[in-house]
Image: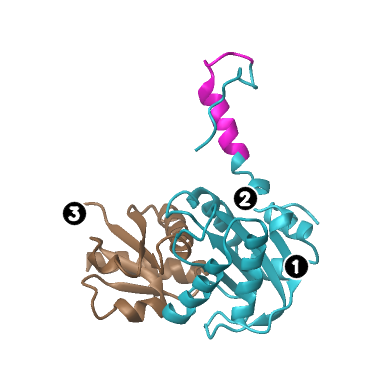
Chain colours: A brown, B cyan
Amino acid sequence: MGTIRIQTVCGFGCGSSLFLKMKIQDILKENNLEAEVFCGDIGTCISTPCDVIFTSEELASRIKDRSKVPVVTIGSFVNKKEVTAKTLEFFQSLEG
Amino acid sequence: MFPIPLKDCELCSQEQKCYAKYTKNMIKEVLSLDNILNESHIRIKEEAEDWEGAIRKAGDVLVQAGSIKPAYIDKMIRSVKELGPYIVIMPGFALAHAAPCEDVVKSDIALITLKNPVCFKSPNDPVSVVLCLGCTDSSSHLDMLSAIAGLLMEEGRIPEIAGADSAKEVIGILSGAEK
């Protein structure tokens, strides 16, 4: 299996998605997990190849039905517990 | 990008040879907190009636700094109306911005705190700290924003900033200094 590609998504791919990207990168490092994390915008994220999309609840509802990959929603980007649990959950789903 | 040094290296007086060192030092300087967010870009206990007013107040700081045109403020507000309050990315904190466009003169960041918190209809309401970001393209501001994101995303940081009584105190909190 190649490198896992995680896309963090916000309105324009240059603001809050960066915050989320950094948080996920921290968590990957702490848990010895490897993945490529990159930012995307809500308009084009569906057509960008990736293995999973992480975004806010508000934006997730706009793409959930059309996305070919799992869409993980994060309520608070600063809540390490939440982001860690959801990141690890995604990695576990890959094994199953 | 960073200006090319035409004079001798300030660190060791060698000409050209330690260009890398010089550049590294300059990058560090450019990315110091003071260059990302200094006191002139912080407003404390601003009064706003609602979320739109809060975004306007934060945007005004960048208009006054000459970094954005007023039209950019309308775009930030429109983006929330179209995409929802997703910019409230953590409790008490909104990251107001729009897509890179010609209304941004230079990539810049401003921070305001609110006297009375406002609601965006987000689960992370009420909001008392608004960071306003203007970017000329989707990459030139990333170092700046990553640096500030790292400082803001510590748990408990936002309430601490919201309670600050001066811009200086906010800088102190962000730089981890003792009060």
Residue denoted by label 1: B44
Q: Residue B3 versus residue A79: which sits nearer the camera? A: B3
Q: Are marks 2 and 1 in contact (CB under 8 Å)?
A: no
In the picture, measured across the screen, residue B25 lies left or right of residue B116, that is: left
Q: CA distance from mark 3 to mark 1?
A: 51 Å
How crowded is the residue under tag 1: few (<14 C-alpha within 10 Å), some, or many (20+)?
Answer: many
Look at the image and give the residue range highlighted in magenta.
B13-29
- Residue A41 at x, y percent in the picture: 36, 65
Q: CA distance from mark 2 to mark 1?
A: 17 Å
Q: Looking at the picture, does residue B78 appear above or below residue A48?
A: below
Q: Is residue B125 left or right of residue A49?
A: right
Disc 3 to disc 2, how far (Cα)?
40 Å
Q: Does any portion of residue B68 appear in the rendered image?
A: yes
Percent position (x, y) of residue A73?
39, 75
Circle 3 chain: A
Residue type at tag 1: Ile
Q: Is residue A79 above or below residue B109?
A: below
Residue B36 got which mark? 2
One can see residue B156 in this view: no
Q: Decide: is B65 above or below B114.
A: above
Front tag of 3 and 1: 1
The stretch drawn in magenta includes residue B27:
yes
Residue B33 x, y percent position in the rendering: 65, 48
- Letter of the chain that mark 1 sits on in the rendering: B
Name which of mark 2 and mark 1 comes first in the sequence: 2
* Main SS class of the magenta portion in the image: helix
Query: Where's residue B142, x and y in %?
Result: 48, 51
Residue at image point 54% right, 19% down? B18
Q: Quadrant of residue B12?
A: top right
The secondary element bearing badge 1 is classed as strand
**Three-letter code for the amino acid on which mark 3 is drawn:** Met
